Image (cartoon, grey):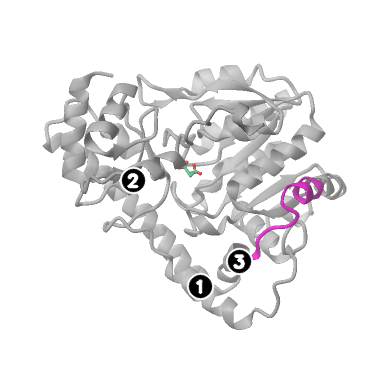
Amino acid sequence: MFDMLLPAPPDAILGLTDAWKNDPNPLKVNLGVGVFKDDAGNTPILASVKAAEALILQSATSKSYMPISGAPEYGACVRELVFGVDHPVVRTGRARTAHTPGGTAALRVGADFLRKALPAAKVWMSTPTWANHKGVFGAAGFVTADYPYYDAAGKGLDFARMCEVLETVPAGDIVLLHACCHNPSGVDLDAAQWGIVAEIAGRCGWLPFLDFAYQGYGDGLEEDRAGVLAFAQVCPEFMIASSFSKNFGLYQDRTGALTLVAGSAEVAASAFSNVEIAIRVNYSNPPAHGGLIVKTILTNETLRHQWVGELDGMRRHIAALRSRFVAALAEHGVPGDYSFIARQKGMFSFSGLGTAQVTFLRERKSIYIVGGGRINVAGITSHNMEYLCTSIKEALEVGE
Ligand code: LMR
């Protein structure tokens, strides 16, 4: 029966890593998947994570099942990270958190829960958005719609058009927003703009769902909360998908969380019991290891301090790379103004390269970039910088 199925296309992002691995060209560069790399091109395990793992190894006594929504202490750590210390939403019991296998499972569990809570809702997504968003919400059975976000000509945020469309979203629909480090554009809202969007959500009655996969990679752990805090002020109900792949470097440990905020502790508890059903029928209960690492780091003052330093270091490394890349493009005589790359936040940059140029770079230069022109800035090193700039110069001659 399976021979009826046509082969599925490779994944738009993870498929590039497979192709890159199989590429024999010694000059090959992977600027596809969003993974932090140091200047040697490695993705090291954070020292704080190693130290936490050593502590866990010593103290662990059982590998029995986790609760469906994970350890309560983990949930408390996540809420403090997301909202800050002693936030009223948390203090009053209006926020409940489930430990999920990565940010993707947080989105999928959230989507399954929302499909039950709001079966007639549409899910609105930014243009562009993370390549997997439509897949995740579509797989949960949702119809999706788009709202304007990126202004390709101005290489910035099209805030006016974004708000114009968000004003038309019906009450009870869901709007997916990138809390910081917009993936793929690297273009974010500032605190004042978040306040305006939250006010629209509150007035129109749509449900904000924040994808918070890069906390700490934008302007800092606290600064990156601006969107979350804006919604917490205005909206009685919203949801947050956290990922600890990038900020703790726990990519392969699949560590994330889904936080549900409701108007009262009672509503939060009953709604959350439905989140637990969505988890039980998907994967039963979460894998423990990554959550133990996050909890161990966040509850140990020394490790937490070390981790914050390591996260700040990764953010500064990427910011410095952005400036160096802009300067190197100019030095190599690549035509155009690339100063926008230095203004973007997080791992990604929308390079402005068109489909033909992305294909040329992959096929002729073994430089792997996500379709649409997204590059992972963290994949640039002092060793591949020159090759990258000269190749981009050649690609521009190809035309878009
Ligand atoms: C990315 O956008 O590259 C990351 O979020 C990894 C992924 O799963 O796509």
Residue 135 is tagged as: none
The kind of residue on which mark 3 rests is His
The kind of residue on which mark 1 rests is Leu
Q: Secondary structure at mark 2?
A: loop
Per the image, the residue denoted by label 3 is 289
Q: Quadrant of residue 392?
A: top left
Residue 265 percent coordinates (x, y): 83, 50
Per the image, the residue denoted by label 1 is 303
Q: Considering only order in the chain, which callout, 3 or 1, is on the residue closer to the N terminus? A: 3
Question: Compared with residue 304, is residue 4 higher up or lower down, i.e. above or below?
Answer: above
For the magenta stretch, what is the residue range?
276-289
The answer to whether residue 329 is seen in the rendering is no
Q: Nearer the viewer, residue 78 or 68?
A: 68
Q: Secondary structure at mark 3?
A: helix
Dot 1 and dot 2 residues touching (CB under 8 Å): no
Asked if the beta carbon under badge 1 is closer than 8 A to the nearest atom of ligand 1, the reply is no
Dot 1 and dot 3 residues touching (CB under 8 Å): no
Dot 3 and dot 2 residues touching (CB under 8 Å): no
Query: How far is the residue under mark 3 from the one under mark 2?
Result: 30 Å
Left or right, 358 with reference to 183: left
Q: Considering only order in the chain, which callout, 2 or 1, is on the residue closer to the N terminus? A: 2
Eye-nearest disc, 1 or 2? 2
Q: Residues within 10 Å of mark 1 (few under 14, many from 20)?
A: some
Tell whether position 279 is magenta: yes
Left or right, 169 with reference to 49: right
Residue 22 is tagged as: 2
Query: Predominant secondary structure in magenta?
Result: helix
